[in-house]
Image (tube, grey):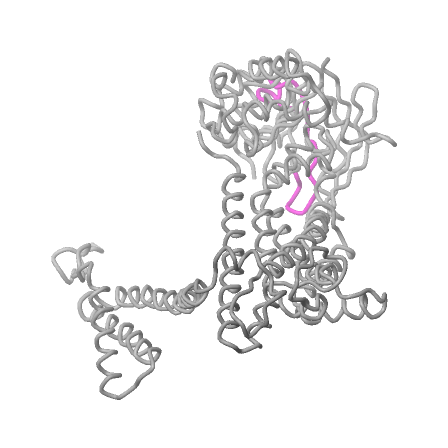
Amino acid sequence: MAKRIDISGLNAYYGSFLAIEDISMTVEPRSVTAFIGPSGCGKSTFLRTLNRMHEVTPGGRVEGKVMLDDEDLYGAGVDPVSVRREIGMVFQRPNPFPTMSVYDNVAAGLRLNGKYKKSELDDVVEKSLRGANLWNEVKDRLNKPGSGLSGGQQQRLCIARAIAVQPKVLLMDEPCSALDPISTLAIEDLIGELKEQFTIVIVTHNMQQAARVSDRTAFFNLAAVGQPGRLIEIDDTERIFSNPSVQATEDYISGRFG
Amino acid sequence: MSHATITPKSASSLHGARLPRWFPWAAAAASVALGFGISALAGLHSDIQWALIAAVLFLIGSYAVASAVEGKRQAKDRTATSLVWVAFLLAVIPLASLIWETVKQGVKVLDGYFLTHSMGVVADAEPGGGIYHALLGTLEQVGIAALISVPLGILTAIYLVEYGRGRLAQAVTFFVDVMTGIPSIVAGLFILSLWIIMLDMGYSGFAGSLALSILMIPIVVRSTEEMLKLVPNELREASLALGIPKWRTILKVVLPTSVGGIVNGVMLAIARITGETAPVLLLVWGTATINANPFDGPQASLPMYIYLQYNNGSEPAYDRAWAAALTLIAFIMVLNLAARGIARWKAPKTGR
């Protein structure tokens, strides 16, 4: 199910502006990889290159290779729509579809991609909501609008929506930054469960969170404002937080940065 | 001790003298009375004159009283509030009096007979007759114009918001802006020269519909564009990230989210072109008899009917013109109410 991602020599541009430069790393399957680094260093941009969402932004352009197991996501003839079915994404702010009910939100990915039988859909919706630890809270209000849930519930609804299409990889762009500590804990627990099935990549500004949930951590930095962001190092989370091999990483983690 | 240097004017710095709640009403009543008095003494007869005097008195009076009692800041606040009220009344009075006058004059001959009979056997100077032919013509012409303009307009707006990049989109936006400003008589003359003179087609309701489309398309494009821009980009990204193709994202996520506003815009556009007279006069030609076929021969329409009846100048014709005007206003009002209803019904749900 879960797949490995191999990135080599990746550059991403906004128009003529080089946002991230020459990134190479491996994201291991069935594990959580965390991206940390200061604002504007290109973590989110890099994340969005992994499911070809970067090119949705006007002027967005990518060079380099992203191998999902043995397929290049940027190879000739690759359909970005199929890539996004394999690699799902959860955004910073919860964004359930406002016109749809809780049920329809979860079913959206399947329903909008083809015909499904009602009973099949019911199963997938229940499984996904259970997978996102939301089933017990919403099972009596599946037909109520998804935007009526609380922020934390909405974010778990978005996770349920993302895992309903059975992706191989789940990308999370600061999924807890708009949530309170209790909802954050619920989502972190969920990440721990989801990594049994999916390869997970999470961008976070919260270093404790990176330390709690991830197996491997990548530190990004940029030389100066206007310079492209770069990968400084990637290693096991324990090593990054105890004994990083680059001084800049230690400075950033211990708060002595800049 | 910084706070010791400030000596409060009164016992408490939070409490000041306040005018009572009824003060604005009393001031308004007093200035209306004064306005009446002054214009009676000066021998002015127009309603507008005493109302303007009252409005000016109200503004000056409430500023003077408030600044004496409450202080400068509150007085300015009251002046701003009063200005808003005066502007509101100035805007509403003509509207209300227009509707009042139309209803008063219009109900004289407006009945079932009037709505279901044409002018075919009645001379314009005689009483009797009705607007059935004009109502039918208006409904058909506006309906066809909407059938042409709504798909074109909505698809253009989708192109501009979702796909349009670079020069082509800029050009389309520019020409839509230009089209918004086209006077209706010019649209009529364009279709007259193209459809009737160059292509040698006869006068018909359809020719009128073509001209009305030219007027309607830019309104639909503009309003739909604004509505589509209001849809948060996050929803599009959420949908694309689920592996939903772009066209389906537009169809199933973007359009449903904005459908209320789009329908509202379409209804307002229809309301706007329903009252157009010039292109209809040029292209539909007008008839006193019922012609249900919009593609063949002259038709009638409500605005043109009103114009022709007014032109006739006889008492029964005036009554019919007022009744037709009332029907037209009622029709547009129903459209607006329907638009509001649909917008509310289709608005994204937020309830818990």
Q: Which image quarter: residue A166?
A: top right
Q: Please tell me how many numbered marks the rendered image carries.
A: 0
The x, y position of residue A173, in whole percent, is 61, 30
Magenta segment? A222-245
Counting from the top left corner in percent of width and height, residue B226 is at: 60, 51
Given the current orientation, which residue lies at the most extreme right position?
Answer: A76
* Residue B195 among magenta residues: no
Q: Is residue A258 above or below residue B129?
A: above
Residue at position x 50%, y 44% in the image: B341
- Residue A230 vs A162, above or below: the answer is below
Residue A238 counted in the magenta span: yes
Quarter that holds the N terminus of chain B: bottom left
Expressed as whole percent of the image width and height from the top left, the position of residue B54 reads 28, 75
For residue A92, side relative to residue B68 (left or right): right
Figure check: B82 above or below A141:
below
User: A44 or A246: which is nearer to us?
Assistant: A44
Q: Is residue B257 left or right of residue B30?
A: right
